[in-house]
Amino acid sequence: KRRRESADFPGSKVILHQLKHGPSRCRVGLRASPGPPVRAGARILTAEGDDVVGYVTSGGPSPSLGVNIAMGYVQVECSRVGSNLSVKVRDKTVGATVCKLPFLRPKFYQPGKNNK
């Protein structure tokens, strides 16, 4: 509380602004439609494909899920699970759906969790 009031730490201006107003973007998981795999640096567009709402940080095919997956940052308004978006991959637009992270449920023992 004292540090928030004095704002005397590195990055205080940005961090205090985000605490007060919320972040402008959010990290999301994406399940892409069949086609070329989504890779880092690809632009995330609205479902109509007219506005850029974010970018992909990593992505590729998922053998465990059988689909192409990616993670990226999008505007908070577009981060709701189930939202339909598009991703620009090599001058082609590929459909994508926002999904929950992690993509796969952990299968190792976690103390204090229901491990069924």
Image (spheres, helix red, strand yellow):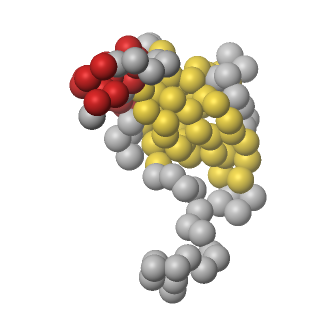
Left or right? Give the position of 51 relative to 106.
left
Based on the displayed image, in which of its 4 quarters is residue 38 positioned? top right
Q: Quadrant of the N terminus?
A: top left
Q: Is any atom of residue 47 visible in this view? A: no
Residue 32: image location, x then y, percent: 59, 41
Residue 46 percent location from the top left of the image:
43, 23
* Of 34 and 53, the residue lying toward us: 53
- Residue 13: in sight, yes or no? yes
* Residue located 65% across and 52% down the image: 67
Q: Residue at x 61, y 29 (%)?
A: 56
Residue 8: image x %, image y %? Answer: 40, 18
Rendered view: 116 above or below 37: below
Name the foreground residue: 25 vs 62: 25
Q: Is residue 52 left or right of residue 20?
A: right
Return the residue found at the far bottom.
Answer: 116
How many dots with numbers? Answer: 0
Residue 24's x, y, as percent? Answer: 37, 22
Quarter occupied by residue 90: top right
Tell me: residue 100, above or below residue 54. Answer: below
Q: Residue at x 62, y 40 (%)?
A: 70
Which residue is painted at 55% across and 56% down in the image? 102
